[in-house]
Image (spheres, rainbow, N blue to C red):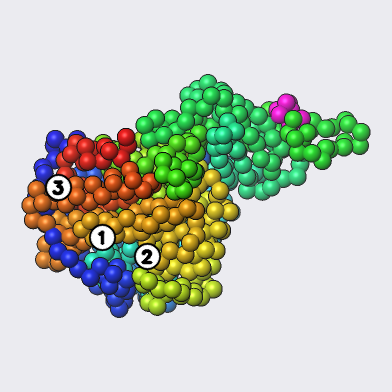
Amino acid sequence: MRSKLPIFLLSLSLTNVTALRAQTPTPSTPQVRPAPIMSRWEKQITAENAWREYPRPQLVRQQWQNLNGMWEYAITPKTAPQPTRFQGQILVPFSVESTLSKVTKSLSPDQRLWYRRNVTIPRDWNGQRVLLHFGAVDYECSLWVNGGLVGSHTGGSDAFSFDVTDFLKDGQNQLVLGVTDPTSTGEQPRGKQLLNPNGIWYTPVSGIWQTVWMEPVAKERYMEEVRLTPEVDSGRIRVEVLTDKPSTNPTTAIRVTALDGQQTIGSTIVREGRVAYLPVKNPKLWSTENPFLYNFRAELVTVKDPFEGTANNKRPRRNDAEQTAYASATVNGNPLDVVTSYFAMRKISVGAGPVAGQPVLLLNNKFVFQNGPLDQGWWPAGLLTPPSDEAMAFEIDFLKKSGFNMLRKHIKIEPDRYYYLCDKLGILVWQDMPSGFLEGQNEHPGDQYEPIRRSKGREQFELELRRMMNQLHNHPSIVTWVVHNEGWGQYENARMAAWVKGMDPSRTVNAVSGWNDRNSGDFYDIHTYEPEPRAPEAKSNRVVVIGEFGGIGWPVKGHLWNPEMRNWGYQTYQSADDVLKAYQKKYAKIVEYYQKQALSAAVYTQTTDVEGEVNGLLTYDREVIKIPVETLRQIHAPLFK
């Protein structure tokens, strides 16, 4: 991999880091510009090959139709009615600001972006209901089918769907989607987007930015959600299957099956609405060295009521008695619905480590240091939308070969296939909740009190946080939820950390990464961008981590987003030797803290350059590896001894 990529020299300057990271410039809507550089994968994108893979690997059905490709688009005033004439074509699923969209225009908060296309429903879907899925649309949208208003959605990073069956007709059907996006004029979760991008703030993303697709489902009822939670110490997997219409009919049941490859290792039937447990004997534990995935199948079935014919059809009050009866129930006919998925036997927890009194992070009950980069997930021509599976796999493979076993996905939620690749290739993920705030709603380092938030802002943040956790729950690679980043929109941090832990006790919770610790969650997390990272103080009740450090900048000529702007790093160097020495010096301190103070994890800033931020291990176009892979691996090796 690295032998094909040139190694260039790097570049060092100090800046007022706190001011830069906390600022929210006055909103404006400058015109975006075509990407001056692209990754090799972005150069290969066409309307015919853009995101053709199945978009939901954790809940798979055989029939589906991909709607990515060319749609019509128009931009109108927000107050204008639906247009009758459209202005051109846009490549879905890339945002209107992106180069890959073939539009590359800004969307201001007082404008509305319209999409339109025709679809034909396959004849073999007759007699089934049709769901129209959107992987993500930033930020508020409404859908019309054949002129009828189907519904609306608010939230820029989560998947959603509409049942469009009743709006369809024979032949062609017209879809129209209207989208508005306040970007940084609103306090909604938006991550690094800013109307006037600069420094560590990036180009806005508006409209559709993940796959659009349709699938048929059973007319009467279908399985809508599958939640899989490994319980390693008990040697079993907890299974929760929920349908779109809960049933009290005792003949409706769920059959769940766990498989090692094609071999069944456990199967049972439970009455609908009940939790199932599948034993996994001698489990093959998932780790970064051996990311083993079990296959899974769920079927919605009808059964003979196991209590029919008993005295007064009396049903047991004890769940275990009911479960025993249903486990051996007779299935009638073919399943009403079938979905496939996968799971892993993996445990993340906090426990005793090598230094007395200092808890550490445990993977499968063993202390494993978590070494990873801050991973922004931005691309020069696609912005928030990665170009392909191949491109995402390249990055993950690069990180693993470089001696990283973790990444912190920084205030961005990726397409579901990204986490599938993390599961499959074996890398731990700290998943940030995207932040959002207005001026005056962010803390500053050392603040003793958290700013209060409006109810509307709190409700939306918590709604989208819950959606993120629900939709990503099954991915074994995700081991930590990061609630707040620094002081960006931070509020009621102790309550939020406890709430997140209550919703998902199977993972660790980082209440706030950096700045103002509130003695909450499982982590004490500091950010330290000094030339030598400082050590976090010991904590007897939490693990200690360095949630951000590093930031060695190097503006590589020919691979810059904008050579005319100030290309920014926390420190910037001008020679490869100086860059390498700085990196070695920083990691020498990380190794020291790991060995002497039981530091549990460190997050280096960052995987790639992003726009004007040039402190990546890779350039923004992913063409230059700034420090050789083998050198990185050798530097990191002491962390795994």
**Mark 2 surroundings: few (<14), some (14-19) or many (≥20) residues within 10 A:** many
| Residue type at the position of mark 1 | Tyr
Label 2 and label 3: CA atoms lie apart by 28 Å
Instruction: Give the residue pinned by disc 3.
Output: 580
**Mark 1 surroundings: few (<14), some (14-19) or many (≥20) residues within 10 A:** some
Is residue 218 shown in magenta? no
Q: Is residue 628 visible?
A: yes
Residue 465 drawn above or below residue 480: below
Q: Which residue occupies 46% across, 73% down?
A: 450
Label 1 and label 3: CA atoms lie apart by 16 Å
Instruction: Give the residue pinned by disc 1.
Output: 529
- Answer with mark 1 or mark 2, whichever residue precedes in sequence: 2
| Residue type at the position of mark 2 | Trp
The x, y position of residue 344, in whole percent, is 49, 34
Q: Which residue occupies 46% across, 48% down?
A: 357
Q: Look at the image and give the residue range highlighted in magenta.
A: 325-332
The x, y position of residue 204, in whole percent, is 31, 65
